[in-house]
Amino acid sequence: MDDFDLSTLIPWVLERIVNYEYEVSRDSKGQIESVDLDPFYGEAKKRFEVIEAKLLAGMSTEYRAAFLPLKEGYTQETLTVAMAKLFPSGGPRVAERFAERLAGATWEELVRWLDYIYTAAWEGEGEWEGMGPRLARAREGFGNFSDAAVEKLIQSSQPESLRMYIEKKYARDLIKLFPKFVDRADLDLRRLLKANLEPPNPVKRLLNEAVRCYIYGQFLGSLCVCRAAIEAGIEDRLRTEGWGVDVENINTKEGKLFKLIELAGEKRLLDHDGKKWAHDVRTLCRDAIHGVRLPSEAECRSAFCRTRGVLEFLYSSHSDPNPNS
């Protein structure tokens, strides 16, 4: 077997796919039978027929209707008209300037130039972030009115393009983050949590959500779900052991989780370390939620590991709940 692992191979393959460096074989029904990576790595995307196919596939019917006739020949006037339709936001002056620059260009030169412009404007990354990745990213938070106007334009003229930009954005995120996902799962989940008691489904689900948030790098989300998992676990164990009345008598205005942790300590459901870890997670999450201070990645990692330790102690007779031991 080759001396590389899947955490190296998978991002490499995804990068080839995102860059169109592959060939697809389909059956008579149009279903994919096989995908072969182009043997000429780095060269496939430079081939004219690949560029032409990609460019035309990303165009709306209207844009293709404006551009394709140039393949059969054009005058300066028809070239200017085509540029005006392809770049409507630039106005007549931009269309005229583009047409002057492209005067006498061959079909291949036109295709390569337009592909370069579209790629830079819509797919650029990093310092030269294009509109496509920008819109995909903006959907995760707040966008401005300019972004909304561009999004509306794309949805009306090139609806399939926005989906493509979103696909590429998250594919590239996966390429960069996949090895980190694997490392976190490998290093921070070193062993199974041993439970002699069966946790209820809500506690299982909260722990699972916390783990997945942490592995996928959503550290604040993981911290919040860790807090919820500790609260659910402590309350479940207190009620199961017959202290439901004590739980009902907790004054939630004074901080329910704080009281639950203290009560669990009194009833010996948590030892000294377990109480401290639970309070550490509670405090860190409280400060983050109320905007006092956002925790670092390292602090979130510690909270995650301590949450696993608290839950293991609650649902087992394990004397050393340290998740990193």
Image: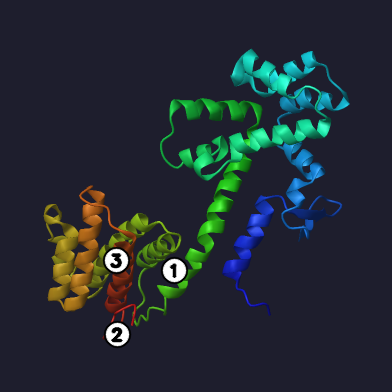
Quarter assignment of residue 41 = bottom right
Observer-nearest of 230 and 161: 161
Q: Work out how far the residue at label 2 is from the one at label 3, CA to CA, in angstroms.
A: 20 Å
Which residue is depicted at the point 14% across and 69% down? 262
Check residue 303 in the rendering and tell me which mark sits there, or answer none: 3
Q: Amino acid at mark 1?
A: Arg
Asked if residue 266 lies left or right of residue 191, the reply is: left
Asked if residue 197 lies left or right of residue 14, the reply is: left
Comparing labels 1 and 2, the label whose residue is closer to the camera: 1
Q: Amino acid at mark 2?
A: His
Observer-nearest of 162 and 45: 45
Q: Residues within 10 Å of mark 3 (few under 14, many from 20)?
A: many
Which residue is depicted at the point 73% across and 37% down? 55
Q: Residue tagged by mark 2?
A: 318
Observer-nearest of 75 and 167: 75
Q: Is residue 186 visible?
A: yes
Of helix, strand and loop, which one carries label 1? Answer: helix
Q: Position of residue 196 (x, y in %)?
A: 35, 83
Is the residue under label 2 in contact with that under label 1 (CB below 8 Å)? no
Of helix, strand and loop, which one carries label 3? Answer: helix
Quarter assignment of residue 212 = bottom left
Q: Amino acid at mark 3?
A: Ala
Q: Position of residue 180 (x, y in %)?
A: 48, 64
Q: Earlier in the sequence, mark 1 or mark 2?
A: 1
Observer-nearest of 267 and 136: 136
